Each structure stands twice: as C-alpha cells, then as structure tokens.
Amino acid sequence: MNEMQSQNEQIDLLIINCLSKEISQDELNTLRAWIMESEKNRKYFMQLQDIWNSSSTKADADFNSELAYQYFLSRISAFQKETPKTRKLFFTRPPFQWAVAACVAFLLGGLSLSLYNSRISENKFYSVSVPFGAKSKIELPDKSVVWLNAGSTLRYQQNFGQKSRQVSLIGEGYFEIAKNAAMPFVVKANEVSVKVLGTKFDVKAYPDDKQLDVTLLQGSIGLSTVYKPDSSLLLVPNQRAILNRANHNVSISRFQASNAAAWTKGEIIFDEELFGQIVRRLEREYNVTINVKDESINRLCFYGDFRNAQSIEEIFNIMTANNEFHYKMKTSIITVYK
C-alpha cells in the first residue's frame, strides 16, 4: 500500500467516524484541515454525506442498521463506478448505529458545513456557516474567494458555476470574484441584490442591524433592493451604499473601502463610528454580550485601529480612557455605564 492510498483510507475513515458521530476533537481538526485544502476535498465529503443520508432515512422502530449499512455500501460502489478515479473505500465495521433523518451538521473548529435538499426545488445546496468569535475563508467552484465574518452564512447550489453564479448571504462577507463576462455573479443578501462580473467588495447584511452596507474596493457592481427591484445603482471603487432599513432609502458616499475588508486581515477599524454600532461588531468578533445602561453612550463616536490579537478588555480600556463611560466585565458579559 503506497502512502497516498494510506492517506486516502485514513480520510475516508475520518469521514465515516464523523457521520456516525464517533469522532474525537483531534480527528475533527484533521478532517477540517483536509476539507479546507480544496474545493475537490469539500465536494468529496459532501458527496459521501449525501449518500450516507439517503441510505438511512428511516427513523422508526423498524429501522435495520445492518440493512442500512449494506445499502450504504451498494451506494458507495455505484458512486465509485460513476467516478472511477475515486479511491476505493474500505470499512471494518458497520457505521450505522441510528437512522439519520436529516442532513448531518458538520462542526469543525467553528465552521459548519452541510448539504441539503431544497424544499422549493430539486437542486441541492451547500451551506457554510461561521459562529460568533470566528471567521473563515472559502473558495467557490469558479475560483472566487469569499471570507465569512463572525455569525455569517453563505449558501449556494451544488451545480454553482454551470448555468449561474448566485449565492445568498446572511451576515458579512468579503468577495473576490473570478471574472466571467458570460456569467454574472449575484449575491442575495436580505433586501439587497448585488450583481458583478469580476470585482472585490464587502457586504454587511446582519438581520439585527439597522442598516445594510455594500462597499466596493475594485471594479464595479450593480445594486438593487426588494423595495425598488427595477432600479439599479452603480457603485465605483471607494464608494459605500447604505440601505436604511427604517425608511428603505439607499445612500451612496465616498468611503475608504480597504477599511471595510480590514476584518479579513484580523483588523478592527472604527472610522467615526457610533458606539451602538461598535457594540454589535464587538459582540460578534469576541462572542460576548454587551449591555449598555445609558442610551446616550450609544451616540458617542469613536476612531480606532485594533487587532483581533488584542483582548476585548484592551479595547474597552482604550475607549474608556477619556472617562466618557465605564465598564465592568464578568466572564463573557460586559456592562457599560456612565
């Protein structure tokens, strides 16, 4: 057995251990690193997960784990015949110990990956989620790169790039889009739709924010909203479009666009930003809860340039240096007061 075959079989065993929920944290870390190496690896994992789920859909008392295991092996055999370059899988024990009624959520070091059937179409979708206190970089099948910020989710079809390039975003994502003049790239983010051919831009569309921001770093983008779907706005580099969710108006202004993508480099930049907005950013970045006891504090403006390597206490110590407000912290809860 050569080294490559041995490594392949090790990865296959890790995948089965993960799907059967018999995997250690160290094994999860190894599997996560392998999946994030390439789109090919991620797709392979998703294909096996899909076969696993469809092999064990019965959740009643008559479920036969041995029959489910044999069906899983037959599905794997058919899969390998369709893809002859795929290595052979070998299992030393039946992996089914319970029925999998829905797609398995794959939690690896803060990144959640899942493949599931859409209830409104026959297409299958990938969903990539990042929890608070984390961020992740992924590469799409068309070689476009997306950074997902804390508390964000990206969703796209399994056949992405074949007939269309459309993704949906909840939260914040920084996009570097591979050029394809024949197939525009579309980002659906709550009330906003962004259409591009090849460019770099940031979309911040957290559901609980009072505004939705789209900032362009390079190239050009067309932007429309659900409120005025037939009206498209064109952005040029170093412009930011802000959708006010209260009145549905969109304003466009000059902005140092590189600041919008600074979070992908581990930087936290406040540029005359209201404390009320800063609170939500820090809660996501550090996975903490911040309670502001005096509403007037939320109207204070701050400038700042920090790094994720700095603790939340260091940031608050700097912001409270002028004694405009004070804070106390207990575990992950911060109370801000006059």
Image: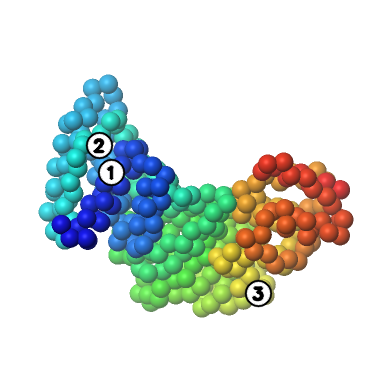
Classify mark 2: helix, strand or loop.
Answer: loop
Instruction: Name the N-terminal-most of marks 3 and 2.
Output: 2
Contact, CB < 8 Å: mark 1 with mark 2?
yes
Residue depicted at x 43% and y 53%: 128
Picture residue at 24% right of the left edge, 26% below the top: 63
Classed neighbour count for the residue bearing mark 1: other residues with Cα under 10 Å, few (<14), some (14–19), many (≥20): many
In the figure, is residue 121 to the left or right of 177? left
Q: Quadrant of residue 183?
A: bottom left
Instruction: Find residue 16 and name its label.
Output: 1
Residue 319, given in percent of the width and then of the height, sits at: 79, 59
In this view, 12 is above or below 309: above
Examine the rendering and report whether any part of residue 107 can be seen.
yes
Q: Amino acid at mark 3?
A: Gln
Q: Residue at x 51, y 78 (%)?
A: 219
Q: Element under label 1?
A: helix
From mark 1 to mark 2, how far is it between C-alphas?
7 Å
Instruction: Count the marks.
Output: 3
Residue named by callout 3: 256
